[in-house]
Amino acid sequence: MSMVINTNLSALNTYNQLNKNNALMNSSLEKLSSGYRINSAADDAAGLAISEKMRGQIRGLNQASSNAQDAISLTQTAEGALDETTSILQRMRELAVQASSDTLTEDDRTAIQDEVNQLRQEIDRIADDTEFNTKKLLNGELSKTATASGTNAASIDSAVAGTNTKAGVYDVTFTTAATQATVGSQANATANSTGTLTTATDVSSFAGDIQINGTTITIESGDTVDDVVKKINNVSGDTGVTATLDSTDATNNFIQLTSDSYGSNATISLSGATATLQDLFAATTGTETTVSDAGTDAVGTINGQTATGKGNTLTLNKSGDAADGLTVVGKDGTVADGDTATITVGTDNALYFQIGANEGQGIELAINNMDAYSLGVATSDGTDTGLDLSTSSKATAAITTIDSAINKVSSERAKLGAVENRLEHTINNLTTSSENLTAAESRIRDVDMASEMATYTKLSVLNQAATAMLAQANQLPQQVLSLLK
């Protein structure tokens, strides 16, 4: 080795090693002070990319858990309001049962009717005022949409998606439309009617009482056919029956009775003297004094599956079918045998809960309208109670109507409860996923403090040694002075 002054290679080499040690020790200090193994992309480029992706997932999972908790609060708010609606309906049913007994006076029934009217208004108030974060929950704004189109769409009065109905397009066919109950027919008129009746025909020979659905109508001496028709129609609100003079056969006209509603619930019971029933109504043969008839329910299919008919209403009750729960209402007197239409169910108004960290990881919740009209206990939107308890027969019929309303509310509550339970499991799953993913991210990103401290200690000793050796290397050129003496 030559002895030179200008270039101290030993010092340069030692200085280079000292700089390397300093860089490594600074990096170790940064890791120890931050707790992270990766503080910049230079520490581990691939590890940084992987861990940042994991961090995004972790934060998304945590927020999704928070979203699910908010969704539970929303469903609890709606279900709590419907709990009170159920209590109201139970009270209305109790009053209907009470009003079904003829031990009550007219004043008693009036008092009961007043309470029922107030209860109906409270159902509407609950539906209108129940909110979560200013969102109205029970007034129908969050329900699934169901619209009719196609050849006979004009014959469809309404369509309502059920709890289990999925968004989609479904075909509905009214194979046979519902019918009204009738008493008197042209077939037996020829055999039983004594001649041609006109509106002016005197029916004094039939003077006496007849009963239609439990309501008595008195035919008096001097009454004409027109008088009898008017008397029957004057009490149609009580009987649910309308009278007309059937004149389709010029030689055998008669008074025909027709129920105002359609389906098997529409019934007519007519009783009176045999001659009156035979000759005035062409309603019976032989010596019968009471005749009755009931309408028939619609028959049809929804989504190719046999639907349940009630009046002109078709409902698909088939678990697992996409259209399960879909209800289609035909217009009474308009829908006809063989009418078809297409029902489009959408979820544009339904709530969407983001319960996952990524796109498309959510669930939808539609809440049906829970006002009195939608439940069937009001005949129009907020203007009529829909429950007439003025007579025993009407009060008895109201019990069935209220039972149907209770079932609708219970079904909606069951749906909300099921969603709430599902969200509880969702939160548990999200928490577990976040925990496991955090552990994986920690293994990539976090520093092992014990190992790193050992590294730092080693680098600290090396740094001290290098500093000492640099001092020694800086002394080497002084050996040249001994040659100059």
Image (cartoon, helix red, strand yellow):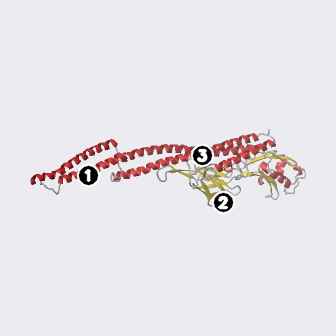
Residue 108, percent from left and from top: 79, 41
Circle 1 sits in a helix, a strand or a loop, which is it?
helix
Q: Which residue is mark 3?
A: 77
Q: Are marks 2 and 3 in contact (CB under 8 Å)?
A: no
Q: Is residue 375 visible?
A: no
Q: Could you tell which of marks 2 and 3 lies nearer the N-terminus?
A: 3
Q: CA distance from mark 2 to mark 3?
A: 38 Å
Q: Which-is-in-front pick, marks 1 and 2? A: 1
Q: Is residue 98 left or right of residue 161?
A: right
Mark 1 residue crowding within 10 angstroms, few (<14) / some (14–19) / many (20+): some
Q: CA distance from mark 1 to mark 2?
A: 88 Å
Circle 2 sits in a helix, a strand or a loop, which is it?
helix
In the rendered structure, which amino acid carries the disc numbered 1? Asn
Q: Is residue 310 visible?
A: yes
Residue at x-position 67% and y-position 46%? 405
Circle 3 sits in a helix, a strand or a loop, which is it?
helix
Residue at x-position 65% and y-position 43%? 84
Residue 180, percent from left and from top: 73, 52
Q: Which residue is mark 1?
A: 19
Residue at x-position 40% and y-position 44%? 439
In the rendered structure, which amino acid carries the disc numbered 2? Ala
Q: Is residue 284 left or right of residue 400?
A: right
In the rendered structure, which amino acid carries the disc numbered 3? Thr
Residue 388, percent from left and from top: 75, 47
Residue at x-position 44% and y-position 48%? 58
Q: Could you tell which of marks 3 and 1 lies nearer the N-terminus?
A: 1
Q: Which-is-in-front pick, marks 3 and 1? A: 1
Q: Which residue is mark 2?
A: 154
